Image (spheres, rainbow, N blue to C red):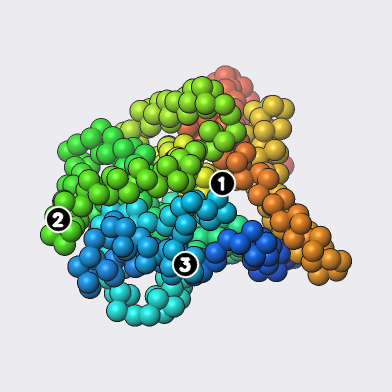
């Protein structure tokens, strides 16, 4: 009997893993053989410069010039040097064909401390190290979220989640660019794990390190500080860890780059100007409506956080709130960057783990769940389809359709947040079997009948 039941289950698991591997391979092939060749041809056709094209490079050059050569990383000379390496030549502000992104050092000075071990190496070596480290940190993040959300996925389920996450276009893009968003996502995952384990001071320290990208760390920091103040006597070490670590980072930054904060603010303002400064909602909707929905999303997240502020760090309510805060961050951050959607991973896992609850809420919720799942898998399916077209038919045709896998990138976070808000904070537990009440006389009758059968 066991083998009869286990065989179909094993077949389903192997089939799911095989499909995940095929979709992952399709995504990887699409990036290498469809997307990148299109970008190269487009750059040549429009005389756009292409150089190193690593998001780590501007931070690494700025850190190297600050630490080793004592130069201002926010200065125009260092920015010109960054442009020369990143694009292959300095940008011409008067040329409409040149990229708008100036690639300046628009990070807090203390990001240089995290890059310190690589500053004496050639950048190609630092680039390789960063790619490997970010890949491993993403693997650790996946394992931590699976554990924190109490997913009963088993080894095959965890492997399936890892394959789909690591071969998703946001993660591939982040690894290709050596994007610090992957590092911030890992720091937030480890912070959540430390909180669940009761190591509050260490969690606060890592939360401070996550502020190397303040736009991504702001809402999670506000939520975790609210959570800490809600039970101050028990959780105050989170605040002490965060404030002490941030104070050390700011003091050390001031020591190596006196007066850096105003220059950092100017660099951020300039970055927002040439990068557009538009959120997902700004792109999807006209300004008044986008602002209203942005405020509504923040208010909804704040309401959920207020209701769960006393929850334990290893509870479903805490995981729900943190997943929602991270998803709202992706929605409202004033920059559309696909690699930031790695922060949606806990929300995706949470909704998958509680899919049965959502499915029982009726047809509208079922339709919303199916649409969200379709938005999630569209990049995998379309990228794999373009890979097959490139292999079997025409690479030129596939490259002409390069944007198709990104069609759902703006809508997926919106749908995900909508489902999170529909999900109850308390997991629905199966109802206990009803207790049958018997009168004393009926109980004596049943007992007598049982004894009579035993005598016979």
Quadrant in which the C terminus is drawn: top right
Q: Position of residue 321 (x, y in %)?
A: 42, 37
User: In the displayed structure, would residue 171 be above or below residue 432?
Assistant: below
- The answer to whether one can see residue 163 in this image is yes
Q: Position of residue 313 (x, y in %)?
A: 35, 44
Q: Position of residue 291 (x, y in %)?
A: 48, 26
- Residue at 66% x, 49% y is 406
Instruction: Identify the secondary structure beneath mark 2.
Output: loop
Name the front one of labels 1 and 2.
2
- Residue at 69% x, 52% y is 403
User: In the displayed structure, would residue 218 be above or below residue 435?
Assistant: below
Write down the residue under mark 3: 89
Q: Quadrant of residue 449?
A: top right
Nearer to the camera, 58 or 87: 87
Write down the residue under mark 1: 348
Which of disc 3 and disc 1 is earlier in sequence?
Answer: 3
Instruction: Identify the secondary structure beneath mark 3.
Output: loop
C-alpha separation, residue under disc 3 versus residue under disc 2: 30 Å
Nearer to the camera, 439 or 234: 234
- Give the numbered dot on residue 258: 2
C-alpha separation, residue under disc 1 versus residue under disc 2: 43 Å
Instruction: Tell me whether circle 1 and circle 2 mark residues in contact (CB < 8 Å).
Output: no
C-alpha separation, residue under disc 1 versus residue under disc 3: 41 Å
């Amino acid at each position: 009997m066991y083998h009869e039941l286990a065989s179909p289950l094993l077949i389903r698991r192997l089939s799911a893993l095989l499909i995940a591997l095929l979709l992952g391979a399709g995504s990887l092939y699409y990036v290498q053989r469809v997307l990148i060749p299109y970008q190269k041809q487009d750059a040549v056709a429009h005389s756009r410069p292409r150089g190193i094209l690593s998001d780590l490079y501007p931070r690494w050059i700025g850190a190297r010039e600050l630490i080793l050569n004592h130069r201002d990383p926010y200065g125009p000379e260092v920015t010109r040097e960054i442009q020369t390496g990143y694009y292959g030549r300095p940008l011409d502000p008067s040329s409409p064909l040149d990229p708008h992104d100036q690639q300046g050092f628009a990070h807090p000075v203390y990001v240089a401390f995290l890059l310190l071990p690589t500053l004496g190496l050639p950048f190609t070596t630092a680039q390789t190290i960063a790619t490997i480290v970010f890949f491993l940190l993403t693997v650790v993040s996946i394992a931590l979220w699976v554990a924190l959300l109490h997913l009963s996925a088993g080894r095959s389920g965890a492997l399936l989640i890892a394959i789909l996450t690591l071969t998703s276009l946001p993660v591939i893009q982040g690894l290709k660019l050596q994007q610090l968003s992957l590092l911030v996502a890992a720091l937030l995952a480890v912070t959540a794990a430390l909180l669940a384990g009761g190591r509050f001071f260490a969690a606060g320290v890592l939360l401070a390190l996550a502020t190397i990208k303040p736009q991504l760390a702001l809402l999670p920091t506000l939520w975790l500080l609210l959570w800490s103040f809600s039970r101050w006597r028990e959780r105050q070490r989170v605040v002490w860890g965060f404030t002490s670590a941030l104070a050390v980072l700011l003091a050390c930054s001031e020591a190596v780059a006196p007066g850096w904060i105003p220059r950092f603010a100017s660099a951020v303002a300039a970055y927002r100007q040439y990068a557009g400064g538009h959120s997902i909602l700004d792109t999807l909707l006209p300004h008044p409506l986008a602002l209203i929905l942005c405020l509504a999303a923040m208010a909804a997240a704040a309401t959920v956080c207020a209701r769960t502020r006393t929850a334990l760090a290893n509870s479903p309510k805490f995981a729900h709130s943190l997943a929602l805060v991270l998803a709202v961050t992706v929605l409202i951050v004033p920059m559309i960057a696909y690699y930031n959607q790695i922060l949606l991973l806990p929300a995706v896992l949470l909704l998958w783990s509680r899919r049965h609850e959502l499915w029982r809420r009726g047809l509208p919720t079922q339709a919303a769940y199916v649409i969200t799942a379709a938005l999630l898998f569209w990049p995998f399916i379309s990228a794999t389809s373009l890979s097959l077209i490139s292999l079997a038919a025409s690479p030129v045709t596939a490259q002409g359709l390069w944007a198709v896998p990104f069609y759902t990138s703006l809508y997926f976070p919106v749908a995900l947040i909508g489902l999170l808000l529909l999900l109850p904070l308390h997991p629905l537990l199966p109802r206990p079997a009803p207790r049958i009440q018997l009168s004393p006389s009926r109980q004596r009758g049943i007992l007598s009948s049982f004894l009579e059968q035993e005598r016979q």
